[in-house]
Image: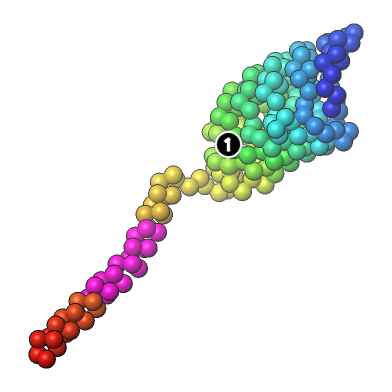
Amino acid sequence: MPSDDGMVEFFGFQHLRVLDLSYCELTGPVPVWLSKLKKLQILNLIHNRITGINGNIPKEIGQLKLLHVLDLDVNNFSSSIPDQISNLKKLETLDVSMNHLYGNIPASLTSLNFLKDFNCSYNNLEGPIPRSTQLQIFNASAFEGNPKLCSAPLPNECRPINDVGTDNKNNQDEHNGHNIPWFHIFVVSEFTVEFWGSVWYFNA
């Protein structure tokens, strides 16, 4: 994508309301000048190879307060979903599917009261889906392809954190359970050898 900030200086460019660069085979990061398009309502970057700076979805997108549609699906973003997206109070569509996003779905997204379409499928997201009418009204297809995501509307339940500690304890007990008998056997065997050795010595 062109990174020249001078683009924003073109006559009328700052009044742009729709920017559609889908299916353009664009690469590289999202340019900084994008955050200066304060009147932008629709941003469509789908089906490119955009990576973002260090793989990040730029936090500056949160400055586009009039944005109604944000489509970033089928790109190469490899970061967490930034909390700043929750600043887009007018957002109705958010699609970040088919990237390489990781981490939790930010609980702050539950403040997007006008969200009608949401899709984060086929990423590497994990943890519970935030409990809210804003996110849990969507069907499971909006979240599928993230094996470590859990809770409604997905069928897999979240595993309690305590279970991890319990498993570790059980593994430790099981491990110790195998070690303790062998230790006792070794001590008893050594004592037996020394005892009979002493008896033979004094009788000799």
Q: Would you name the residue on which mark 1 appears?
A: 104
Q: Position of residue 50 (x, y in %)?
A: 79, 34
Quadrant of image for the C terminus: bottom left
Which color scheme does this rendered protein use?
rainbow
Q: Position of residue 80 (x, y in %)?
A: 63, 34
**Residue pictured at 77% horizontal, 29% vertical:** 29
Residue at the bottom extreme of this rendering: 204
The quadrant in which residue 174 appears is bottom left
- In the image, the segment drawn in magenta is 171-188
The kind of residue on which mark 1 rests is: Asn
The quadrant in which residue 102 appears is top right
Q: Is residue 65 magenta?
A: no
Q: Is residue 187 magenta?
A: yes
Q: Nearer the viewer, residue 158 or 14?
A: 14
Vertical side of 151 occupied by 134: above or below:
above
**Residue pictured at 67% horizontal, 23% vertical:** 59
In the figure, is residue 146 to the left or right of 38?
left
Vertical side of 117 occupied by 170: above or below:
below
